[in-house]
Image (cartoon, rainbow, N blue to C red):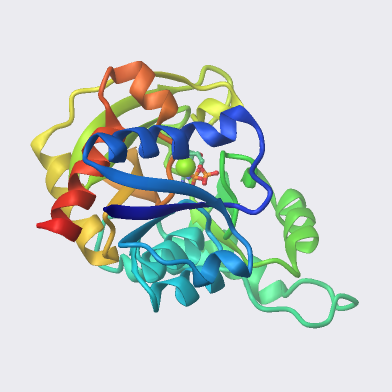
Amino acid sequence: MKQAIILVNAYTQSAAELNQPNRLREELEKYGVRAEIVRNSPGALSRDGDFCVFLDKDKYAARALEKRMRLFNRANAIEICDDKMLTYLALEGFPMPETISSLLCYTPERPVSGTLLDETERRLGYPLVVKENFGSLGKQVYLVRDRASLEKISERLKLLPHLYQKFVAESSGRDVRAICVAGEIVACMLRTHESDFRSNISVGGQGKKFEATGEMRALCREVSARLGLDYCGIDLLFGKDGWLVCEVNSNAFFGGIEGVTGVNVARAYAGHIMREIYG
Ligand SMILES: Nc1ncnc2c1ncn2[C@@H]1O[C@H](COP(=O)(O)OP(=O)(O)O)[C@@H](O)[C@H]1O
Ligand SMILES: [Mg+2]
């Protein structure tokens, strides 16, 4: 009997949160795999299975479980994608907006580095984008318009890893989300927002089906290969000279894009897993 585990975050509860694991289980079952949905826990890490679809982002659990079985995605890929600054560094050479890392601060009573602020505004200009390295759903991404706001936000985020990024004006309120399986774009949507520079659906963006171009396909294939991803959602910005990689989500939700494009993403992912594990 083929068997697998689908590992979800320890605190997963709602039907909405269980949609992704349920859909994957359903599609794996069609291939004859008994897949059990398991919440992250100390005991979960000593389970047996032919493989694990790892839907949490717990890098410690991922590394522990990877000693026992193949993970989809691999632990290293999940860790790099979870951290926007690590992603930027790993994607050196790819077209991305210029990015500056925040500085590690151990002393909350000291004011944020003036050198950091000076260099940031000199290199990036205003407006500029600030992102927490571990943010998602658009919630920890901010647009900063002047020095006073830069100082304020940098002070507030001083103890958290974050980054400063050039604002891509051409892409304000729009981007493209491409879902890739084994590097191939299987579903693609244009996201637009009328009143916010962030186009995430979670902050009110609208999604509609988008025809992926050859250039986008080649870029996404190379990004997936560089990061060692089996599955991901890549956000692409409209740059003035072509596509720019905004970020890579190893654990991208596919419920919304399945609805918008009519593509069965779970089946495509399950198919890839079957080829990898059982040949
Ligand atoms: N440098 C940028 N210039 C213009 N818009 C950006 C830039 N970075 C992010 N955005 C917008 O903000 C959204 C959220 O940023 P992203 O890095 O994808 O973080 P999250 O993980 O929260 O989705 C993007 O989908 C895009 O619409
Ligand atoms: Mg994003």
**Corner quadrant of residue 4:** bottom left
Task: In the displayed orientation, state which residue is furthest to the right.
Answer: 109
Q: Is residue 229 or residue 23 the one in the foreground?
A: 23
Task: In the displayed orientation, state which residue is furthest to the front.
Answer: 1
Residue 230 screen position, x and y as percent: 26, 55
- Describe residue 55's horizontal placement relative to residue 29 as left or right: right
Residue under the point 12% across and 41% down? 215
Residue under the point 25% across and 60% down? 94
Residue 272 screen position, x and y as percent: 19, 48
**Corner quadrant of residue 153:** bottom right
- Describe residue 158's horizontal placement relative to residue 14 as left or right: right
Q: Is residue 163 or residue 252 the one in the foreground?
A: 252
Q: Is residue 249 or residue 244 the one in the foreground?
A: 249
Q: Is residue 1 or residue 243 the one in the foreground?
A: 1
How many discs appear?
A: 0
Residue 9 screen position, x and y as percent: 60, 52
- Describe residue 256's horizontal placement relative to residue 275 as left or right: right
Q: Is residue 54 above or below residue 270?
A: below
Q: Is residue 198 visible?
A: no
Q: Is residue 82 above or below residue 141?
A: below
- Describe residue 153's horizontal placement relative to residue 213 as left or right: right
Task: In the displayed orientation, state which residue is furthest to the bottom.
Answer: 106
Q: Quadrant of the C terminus?
A: bottom left
Q: Is residue 49 above or below residue 189?
A: below
Residue under the point 63% across and 63% down? 41
Residue 187 screen position, x and y as percent: 25, 30
**Corner quadrant of residue 143:** top right
Residue under the point 28% across and 58% down? 229
Q: Is residue 10 visible?
A: yes
